[in-house]
Each structure stands twice: as structure tokens, then as C-alpha cells.
Image: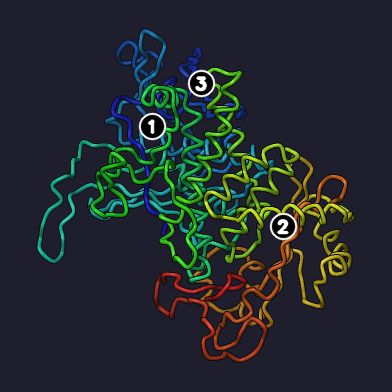
Amino acid sequence: MPDPIGKPSARPTTLNADPFVRDFEPDIGENGEVSVLTTTAPGVTPTGISANTDDPNHARPGRVRFQQDAFEKLPGLKGLLGQSVRVDMELRSDGSLVLDRGSPYLAATTTFVAAASAKAIAERNLGVTLPWGQDGLMPLSNYEVDSWDLNAYYAPNERQIKLANAVRPGVRFFDGEVDAKFDPKNTAYNLANVPEVVAHECGHALLDTLKPGTLLGYSDKQQALHSIDEGLADGMAFFVDLGRAEVVQRALEACNYDLTKNNPLASIGDSIGGMFDSDLYAKPDLNKALRTLRNDMRVEPGVKYECHKGGQIISGALYDFFLERAGSYGKTLKPKEAAFAAGEATAAVFQNALKFTPDDGGMSFQDFGRGLLYADLALNKGRNLDALRKVVVDRNLLSDTEVDAALAQHAGWQQTTLPVPGDKDLAAAEQLLPKLRESFQLGDATLIPGRCEKDARGFTRVVYFQPRANKAAEATNAGIERTYGRIARDSLLSQGSFSVVLDRQGRVAGAFNHIGSGASVCIDGIRGDGQPKREGDPDAMITPSGAKSVFHQDSFNHLVPR
């Protein structure tokens, strides 16, 4: 389960500077209404927030109290589900607006803006609208816990983000020791107050939206997938931070403009790590940050990684590429502008790499390494291949020989031209299938078009699912609904997948064959291929009758079994 990250601000939240919105221009109308314009990151379309004051005359000079509408009703801010938010604000003489950090509704506003930023960054880079959450709306819930149970997570079976609020000190059950570090005045104990926490969890939600169902399993062969997921989620927190000018400036000053040194941008959860006792988190050399992008972790053969530790391989590779791009842009741009530009270039390649990887839970570190190369070939015509080769080889995602093989494979793909289905045109995707069978030797496996998506750059990605042999009966299993909730049935009740990416001209930019990858996963004693269960076959985890939840220990559908 994804764990929390975050970086609370030590001073009042000034919306036009710190910590999560770069520009904030209020406009108070004749009837006391307040209109706000926020810009969440360089290049992101500004998002508008409208609100109404309780008292147009204001009880005290310079004080504004407003009521914000429910998130999903705001034009231009689709995709968030939440309640109305009431916030105290102070209008200072310099024109800045400051949220009252004592307001209980600050958390909802912080969560809302950080989540909107993360979604905007991903959609800009991927060139598609991401229908995350439930019917395109992301529920963001806040729940109360003891300090030692502090956590935040994305629940893929419920498709919502849950953020804990520690309201009392934790007490150890075996000796009664009380958490002496707990400070109820520290607003960071409500993780909804911490933009990096929210952005990190949104990173999980966006991967789950791009590859539905893949986060549901936790078998041995899915360890790399969950490490990749954690690394990209830390990357999302990093990208949201890069959209906050004050954070970037402080980071540059802290490291004397040398981002290879320790700095707030590279440290994920600078101060919140001190709230945790686990060796996994609080490290003295990280100044009690949860994790750092400045690391030398690499894939070690045979090692089974805890997902957050394995995630540092991916986030470290991301930061390596960012530093290379920042150095290149720094030759012609000022440091802050170079960091912004490098962040955008890095986000584009690392987020688009997911389009060039298999659509099942068996994604490996090598798959993601190849995805980085294919993404750069698609986005940048391979201009960054030398830099990416160094990154993936240094992190042992791929060897030099494997890089050469991946590039040769891509060159071979480019010799194949196919008809391009229209966006969301599953009928055309069905008609394309015979040509795909011939071109990629897919045999007679049953394949059903599941998704057909065209992005803003003209790349069309078609995903076919191989249904389980007993899908019709399994779809009526009440335990499946209890366990996995509202998720795509085609991806859930499948035993494999095949994906292809086509450019505007119909040339193949990527093809990923994982047909039969989950054939051995059993439901009620029947394998995905319809055969009776064999010794060693894993069972899909399904909640027993009357139970409310189950921890997903094994694979399901096409999620590769151990």
C-alpha cells in the first residue's frame, strides 16, 4: 500500500508564492464575489476558482472569508470530487493573500490545488484526458488516526485517495509507550495539508488510470511494477514542486545553484520523515526526508525490492536525466528557467514511457527502460538517446547490449505500416486485428479490443485483452465485486494482453505481447485458460462472504502470477 510523503511549509501558506501555487490574482466584484486565477505549473492552462464572500463589507479590513463551490461544479476543474471549502484569507498590503493555517478547511484547499496540478501535468504530457477515480471524479477523503498510524494511500479497488489526519498521540500496544513527538499544532500531521503527499498519491491514481487493474495484484513477479509505480509517484511530487517558483528558488539557493548536491527539490518529504520511526523512512543523512531522488540505487540481479526502496531506482534515474537536461538548458537559460525546462522534458519522457510498456502487472524494470527509449524516439525523434542510454545502463535497467537490441527492434517496427483506428473506435480496432496477427505472429488467441486512444501528438494506442475462458461465469462472482470494486471488467477478467502504438502514418512505434501471461491464475479452482487448477497455481484473492476487505497477496486476471 502506498505510504505517505510530503513537505510541510514552516510558514503561512501564501498563495501567490508558497508553497503550491505560483500566481494568485484575486478580483472582488461589486457583490462581494471573489474570482481567483491560479497557475499550477509552467505551460499549464490556468484554472479558475470562483467563490463568494459571506460579508461583502468584510468584518475587518483586509480580511476575506469566502465559500468555495463543490469542486466538481467548477468550470475548468473537472475530475475532482469533494465538498465545499470555507477558508479564512488575509489580504496583505503587498497584494498577497494568505490562508489562515489554523483553518480546518486549509487541508481541503491544499489537496484540491495539488491534485489539480498533478492531473494537469500528466494530461499535458500524455496528451490525453485521464478519466481517473469514479466516473472521472477523484474522491479525496480525510480520516482520523493516532500519530503512529499516519498514512496516505491510493486504493485501486475503490479508485480513491485517502489521507490520514493524526489527531492524538499513538500508544504502543505491547508496552503502552506514548508517541512523545506528536505535536497537535503541527498541521503536517494532517497529510492533506502537504502538497507532496497529495501529488504522490495522484501519481498512483494516474498510473492506474492509464493501465487499469495493474495495481491490484502483489505477487512476486509484480514487484518491479510496484517499484516503478512508487518511483513515478515520487516523480509526480517532484514535478508539482517544480511548478512552484518559490520552492525552486529555495532549492537553488540551498545547494548554491548546484542541483547535484542535496536540495529540497530532490528530497521527498523533507520534514515529515521525522514523524516516522521506521528505518525505511527517517534517515539522518536525508535530514529525515522520507526518500531522496539523489541516490545511487540500481537494479541488482535476484534482489526482491520493497516497492518504496525499489522505487528509488526509478526516481533516481528520473533525477539523473533531469540533471543532464538542466545542465544542457543551463548553457542558454537562467538557473530557474533551466530547472523548469528540464522538469518538463523529464516529465514528458518518463510519463510517456508508460505508453510503451506492456499492459499487465508483469512490467519489468527492463520493460520500463525500453519504454524510456521508445518514448524519446516518439516525442523527440531520439535526440536524448545518448543521455537515456547512460541513465538506463548506470541504473542497470538495461545493459548496453539490451539498449542496442531495443533500438534495433524499434527500427524493425518502423518497417510495418498499418491502418490507424480513430480515437475510441473499437470497431476499427477489431478490424485491425487480422493484420496484427499476421505481423506479430499472435496465433489464434482470442483478443478483444479494450482501449483505443489517440493522443494530442497523433499517436494511437490500442490495447487488446485475452478474456479468461470462464469469464461469463466469473463476472457474476459476488466476491470479485466485494474485493475489487468498480474497475474495468475487460482488464480484470482477462488472462493476457497485446498492445500496439501507431504514429500518424500508421508506422508501429511499439508492440507488446503478453498473451497468456496470467493463464495460471485461478478463480474457484479454474485457471484463466479454462483448465482445472494445478499444483502451484496461484488463486485470485477474493473476499470471503461477509468480509469487507482483503490484502491483495496474489495476482488476478492477466497480472503475471509468481
Helix, strand or loop at disc 3? helix
- The spot of residue 30 in percent (x, y) is 50, 12
Read off the residue under disc 2: 405
The residue type indicated by label 2 comes to: Ala
Residue 191: which quarter of the image?
top left
| Residue 335, disc | 3
- Alpha carbon separation for disc pair 2 and 3: 37 Å
Quick check: 143 left or right of 381? Answer: left
Disc 2 crowd rating (10 Å Cα; few below 14, some 14-19, many 20+) is few
Disc 1 crowd rating (10 Å Cα; few below 14, some 14-19, many 20+) is many
N-term mark: 1 or 2 = 1
Helix, strand or loop at disc 2? helix
- Alpha carbon separation for disc pair 1 and 2: 37 Å
Up the image or down, 76 lies above or below 429; here it is above
| Residue 263, disc | 1
- The spot of residue 14 in percent (x, y) is 38, 22
Tell me which residue sits at (49%, 74%) in the image. Answer: 554
The residue type indicated by label 3 comes to: Pro
Up the image or down, 122 lies above or below 254; here it is below
N-term mark: 1 or 3 = 1
Tell me which residue sits at (84%, 45%) in the image. Answer: 504
From the viewer's side, name the closer residue of 9 and 12. Answer: 9
Tell me which residue sits at (46%, 42%) in the image. Answer: 199
The residue type indicated by label 1 comes to: Asn
N-term mark: 2 or 3 = 3
Helix, strand or loop at disc 1? loop
